[in-house]
Amino acid sequence: MGTSFGTVVVTGAAGRIGSVVRVGLRGEAERLVLVDRVGLAAQSPAEEVRQLDLRDAEAVTAALEGADAVVHLGGVPDEAPLPELLEGNVGGTHNVLEGARRQGVGRVVLASSNRLTGFYPVSTTITVEMPPRPDGLYGVSKVAVEALGRLYADKFGLSVVCLRIGSFEDAPTERRHLATWLSPRDCLGFVRAALTAPDINFAAVYAVSANTRRFWDVGAGSALGYTPVDDAEAFTPRISPEGDTVEHDLQGGAYANTEYTLRHL
Ligand SMILES: NC(=O)C1=CN([C@@H]2O[C@H](COP(=O)(O)OP(=O)(O)OC[C@H]3O[C@@H](n4cnc5c(N)ncnc54)[C@H](O)[C@@H]3O)[C@@H](O)[C@H]2O)C=CC1
Ligand SMILES: O=C(O)[C@H]1OC(=O)[C@H](O)[C@@H](O)[C@@H]1O
C-alpha cells in the first residue's frame, strides 16, 4: 500500500490499540510520530518517538508540528478516580485538540468509548443521536472528550472524528463481547476510514465489528466509508455461559454494576 496518510501522530502508541494501529499504519503513513509516556523505540525510518505526558500542553503541541492527522488513543482506559479521568482523558484531549488547532492539523481522531452509553438496556439499539447514559465515571470522561471534539469542530473548524470503540480484543472471550467485540482488523479499518473520510466537520461513530448481536447502529459507520467484516457470532461455541456469574441487562455489563464505580471513588 502507498504512503497515503502523510504525517500521522498516534498518542498512546505503546498501548493495546496503539500497538496495532502503529503496525497497521506502518508503510501507509509517510511519517508516524509515536507519542506515549512509556518509552518506545523507532522500528522503521518513518517512525519517530516522543516520550511525553499528555497533560503537558506545550509538549503535546510540539509533537503535533507538521502533522496531517492525529489518532488520539492515550489516556485512562477504564474506571478510575474522577481526578485521574479529568486530568488524563479530559485534560489530555483538550491539549491534543488545542495543539491540533495551533498546528493546523487537518484531522483529529479521538478514542471515545461505547461505555458512554453503557447504561442503556441491551434490548435498545443505540444511535449516536441518543443522549449519553454512561456506565461509570470513565464513561462520563468520554462524554466530555466528545464534547471537546464538538466544540473544537464548531468553534475552530477542526475536522474531528470520535470513534466509540467497542471491546477491542483478539477474539471475544465473554458473552457481552458477542455484541461489543471490535476485532483488530475492523479497528484498523475504522481508524483508516476516520483518517481519510472526506468532508467531515464532526462525526461520532460506533467502532464495532459486524456482530450479529451488536447493540449499536453502525449506519453512521458506513458514512465513514468502512463496513466492518468480522462477526463475534463465530466464536459463540468457545464462550462458556458459566463465564458470566450475573445476567446483565445493561449494555455495559459488569462495568455498569454499582460496585464497579464505588471501588474507584
Ligand atoms: N481497549 C478497548 O476495548 C477500548 C479502548 N478505548 C479507548 O481507546 C484508547 C486506547 O485504549 P487501550 O489501547 O486499550 O489502552 P492502553 O492502556 O493499553 O493504552 C493507553 C496508552 O496511553 C498511554 N497513556 C496514558 N496516559 C497517558 C498520559 N497522561 N500521557 C502519555 N501517555 C499516556 C499509556 O502509557 C498507554 O500506552 C483509550 O483512550 C481508551 O479509553 C475505548 C473503548 C474500548
Ligand atoms: O466496553 C468494553 O468492553 C471496553 O470499553 C472500554 O472503553 C475500555 O477501555 C475497555 O477496557 C473495555 O474492555
Image (cartoon, grey):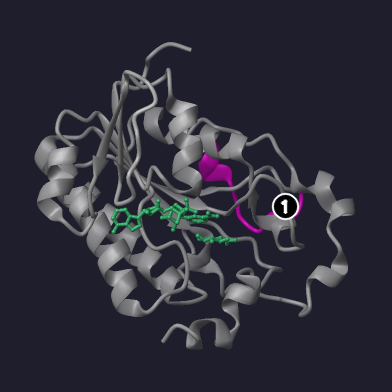
Up/down of 157 relative to 192, above or below: below
Give the dominant element type of the magenta stretch: helix, strand or loop.
loop
Task: Quadrant for the C terminus, please.
Answer: bottom left
Q: Which residues are magenta?
A: 212-222
Answer left or right for 252 relative to 104. Answer: right
Residue 156 seen in render: no
For the point 77% across and 62% down, the residue is: 175
- Say which quarter of the image contains residue 202: top left
- The residue lying toward the viewer, choosing from 218 and 265, is 265
Say which amino acid is labelled 1. Pro
Q: Residue furthest top?
A: 2
Q: Is residue 26 magenta?
A: no
Q: Which residue is mark 1?
A: 172
Answer left or right for 194 relative to 166. Answer: left
Up/down of 188 relative to 110, above or below: above
Please, what secondary structure does the residue beneath circle 1 have?
loop
Q: Quadrant of ligand 1?
A: bottom left
Up/down of 189 relative to 3, above or below: below
- The residue lying toward the viewer, choosing from 79 and 39, is 39
- Say which quarter of the image contains residue 150: bottom left
Up/down of 127 relative to 80, above or below: above
Residue 138 location, x and y as percent? 43, 70
For the point 49% across and 45% down, the residue is: 17
Residue 9 location, x and y as percent? 29, 35
Q: Is residue 215 magenta?
A: yes
